[in-house]
Amino acid sequence: MSGGDPFFQPVSGMDLPRFAGVPTFMRLPGLTPDDPRYADVQMGLIGIPWDGGTTNRPGPRHGPRQLRDYSTMIRAMNPFTGINPFALQNWADLGDVPPNPVDIQDSLDRVTSFYRALHAQGITPMTAGGDHLISLPILRALASDGPLGLIQFDSHTDLFDSYFGGQKFTHGTPFRRAVEEGLVDPKRFVQVGIRGTAYNVDDIEWGEAQGIRIIRIEEFFERGIKDVMTEVREIVGTAPTYCTCDIDFVDPAFAPGTGTPEIGGPNSFQAQQVIRALQGVNLIGADLVEVSPPFDPGGNTAWLGVSLMFELMCMLSAKA
């Protein structure tokens, strides 16, 4: 089944003004599993409005709603890559995973169940978070056939063991759990953009001991995007790989609306460049997390976030 089905095309701004209508991701059809066209979906946009793993400044639970609203500004064609994802694949907005706001484990289980159903139907997911803990239950669903490669754009490793006397599930621990659970192959796991002050270096040392490649921001800028991303592609190879992008990868001058900003990061164009450099990677899903609307009333962070989601959609569509 090829893409380009007229049913799965975004509503054109020439037919309905972008400020009108019910906002769905990219102005695509919004479908539930009981819709007769659901079986024709190849790639799905999903929201996870949950930030129960946040340890300091909350707010990413409101991210998917604002990202949907701002996504009405996205047009169909990427003029640099020449990719129109909607011409290549049947994309649809598949709604939100309904979280349990008072139970972390139940919320994680709900996410995994939702994504297992998508995976069973062969739907490739592009997710809007939510805090970074949402990546763990997604990986639990997608790694059913074996450990995945992982590309992480972030200012933090999220490889900590626990918080507050042994709490294992926060937005600072998802990828340690993913490695421990065998969801991710640490030899095919690369982190790009790591920076900021720290409690200690336990996360870095643990990650490097497992074989995770951690590229700090100093190395990123010294070597340049082309060289770094060549290494990233070599590390993950041709086997199935997931990509996760924390909006705090980008400098807070461009993305202030996030819970744990770190200065000294890439600008918005450089963030586009690293995602475009993923072309050819065997991507089986992606997410964009930690957009926190309360910390950016003007919405620039959400606009950047959904623009990077579009770049990821182009990579997912071209790969398939």
Image (cartoon, grey):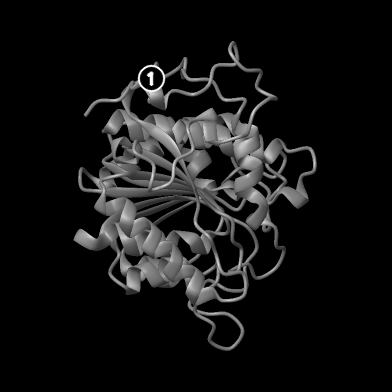
Q: In this view, does 99 lie above or below 246?
A: below
| Residue farthest along the top direction in this orientation | 14
The structure residue drawn at horizontal position 56% and vertical position 69%, both measured from the top left corner, is 100
Depth check, front residue: 219 or 60? 60
Residue 27: quadrant of the picture: top right
Q: Tell me residue 240's x, y (percent).
A: 24, 48
Q: Tell me residue 173's x, y (percent).
A: 49, 70
Left or right of residue 303: residue 166: left
Label 1: state its secondary structure.
helix
Depth check, front residue: 153 or 102? 102
Q: Can residue 268 be seen in this view?
A: yes
The structure residue drawn at horizontal position 39% and vertical position 58%, both measured from the top left corner, is 114
Residue 229: quadrant of the picture: top left
Q: Tell me residue 281's x, y (percent).
A: 29, 38
Left or right of residue 244: residue 306: right
Q: Can residue 169 be seen in this view?
A: no
Depth check, front residue: 160 or 167? 167
Q: In this view, does 252 lie above or below 92?
A: below
**Which residue has dot 1 on it?**
6
Q: Tell me residue 184's x, y (percent).
A: 30, 62
Q: What residue type is labelled 1?
A: Pro
Left or right of residue 314: residue 238: left
Q: Is residue 209 above or below residue 39?
A: below
Depth check, front residue: 130 or 97? 97
| Category of crowding for the residue at label 1, using alpha-carbon neighbours closer than 10 angstroms: few (below 14), some (14–19), many (at least 20) | few
Name the image quarter holding the C terminus.
top left
Name the image quarter holding the N terminus.
top left
The structure residue drawn at horizontal position 56% and vertical position 76%, both measured from the top left corner, is 103
The structure residue drawn at horizontal position 33% and vertical position 31%, both measured from the top left corner, is 317
